[in-house]
Amino acid sequence: MFQWKLHGNGRTVEPGAVVAPGERLNWGATVAIGLQHVIAMFGATFLVPVLTGFPVSTTLLFSGVGTLLFLLVTRNRLPSYLGSSFAFIAPITAATATAGTGSALAGIVAVGVLLTAIGFVVQFAGLGWVDKVMPPVVAGAIVALIGFNLAPVAWQNFQLQPLPGTITLVAVILFSVLFRGFLGRISIFLGVIVGYVATVLIQAATGEALIDFAAVEAAPWVGLPTFEIADFTEPATWSVIAMFLPVVLVLVAENVGHVRGVAAMTDATANRSTGRALIADGVATTLAGTFGGSGTTTYGENIGVMAATRVYSTAVYWVAGLTAILLSLSPKVGAVFNTIPPGVLGGVTTALYGLIGIIGIKIWVDNRVDFSRPVNQYTGAVALVLAIAGFTMQWGDFQLGAIVLGSVAALVIYHLGNAIARARKTGADDGGPIPAVGPLGGDPS
């Protein structure tokens, strides 16, 4: 498993060629590309714990551990980095506010267990049933509603510090449109840096206390991350778990899209690893949630790095995963990211949450969903309004949030509507393959 064939002379990639998962360049180049993958994933991975209040170091640790687990489960045949999934932000935020962090972690664990189970089914039965349950119109609606549901959170942060927020938002947009390749793919990370520096300068010029560096000064350079155990004993835990379950559909779409993307760029046989990829992400998410980290997913930024370098060697991901683990062992690194001011977070999430929503709409466009059909119109329309407005239903301690209601509405309206259409012969199914969704766990640009 840990033997990679040297590609060519080990220094260069020939025109038209790629470094396959089972190959590598020399170790110097391999380490350098692995570090580049760390930079690519870092901007998105640290944002999830910062936005949800989870420890940055803990999330980073399980990001690295999850990546190594992914490589082991997929038998070192599928290159991928598992970073923090943005699909978890909305349910974590809601669950933490109503039931506490322990219950939110229980929701993450539940998602991981269900994703693992789906992975085993896919490994032995194939993906056909997933395509039937979640066709493009439903998949697009669920992905979009998760992003748009977070819009009020972005505004809450933005209005606290409008100037840093505006500078950050403008920087993110400019980096994404001015630069191609690697710099364009890390526009979120670069935008945060610009916004942070701008806030420091504003603080120095005005004397206003926008950033408190006391925690950074007090934090040691080396130390273990903070762990918290998932709590299944709280009365509200089961309603919290229900709130998290729609995230499973997003993670399935992300992982399937990742495998198909790698297969298209390397070897079609990579598609055989789809079930293993789902199992691996499920196990990594379960492990992270059990001990206080955020759920994981395959990362679009890292696919971009592979496409740019034409290096798909799994060796570089071992380097990236181990590097992330080492970074997680520095509490000072986590303290620095915890000082990111709310205005900067508001600016970056204004772009990021909107882009998550746009990915869902892109699924509709790419698959030519026919919105002249009423069943498709109402599948998308009702789901989005439920999510954006923040609809909830509650029975005692059991509550269903907007993401659950929107996801259930999309599934029920689509499948029930088509069943009625078939019975009355007023329309045909609008099926089709599940699309190659760009991972939500990172910068969708």
Image (cartoon, helix red, strand yellow):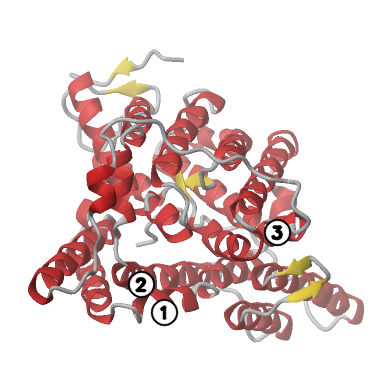
Q: Earlier in the sequence, mark 3 or mark 1?
A: 1
Q: Nearer the viewer, residue 84 or 358?
A: 84
Q: Is residue 221 above or below residue 171?
A: above
Q: Which quadrant would residue 134 be assigned to in this image?
A: bottom right
To which residue does mark 1 refer? 155
Q: For the residue labelled by badge 2, is the local secondary structure a helix, a strand or a loop? A: helix
Q: Which residue is mark 2?
A: 346
Helix, strand or loop at mark 3: helix
Per the model, the C-alpha gap separating discs 1 and 2 is 6 Å
Q: Which mark is residue 14?
A: none
Residue in the picture at 56% in, 65% down: 143
Dot 3 amino acid type = Val
The residue labelled by disc 3 is: 240
Q: Earlier in the sequence, mark 2 or mark 3?
A: 3
The answer to whether the residue labelled 1 contacts the one labelled 2, judged by CB atoms less than 8 Å apart, is yes
- Picture layout, residue 90 above or below residue 279: below
Asked if residue 192 is positioned above or below residue 219 in the image, the reply reads below
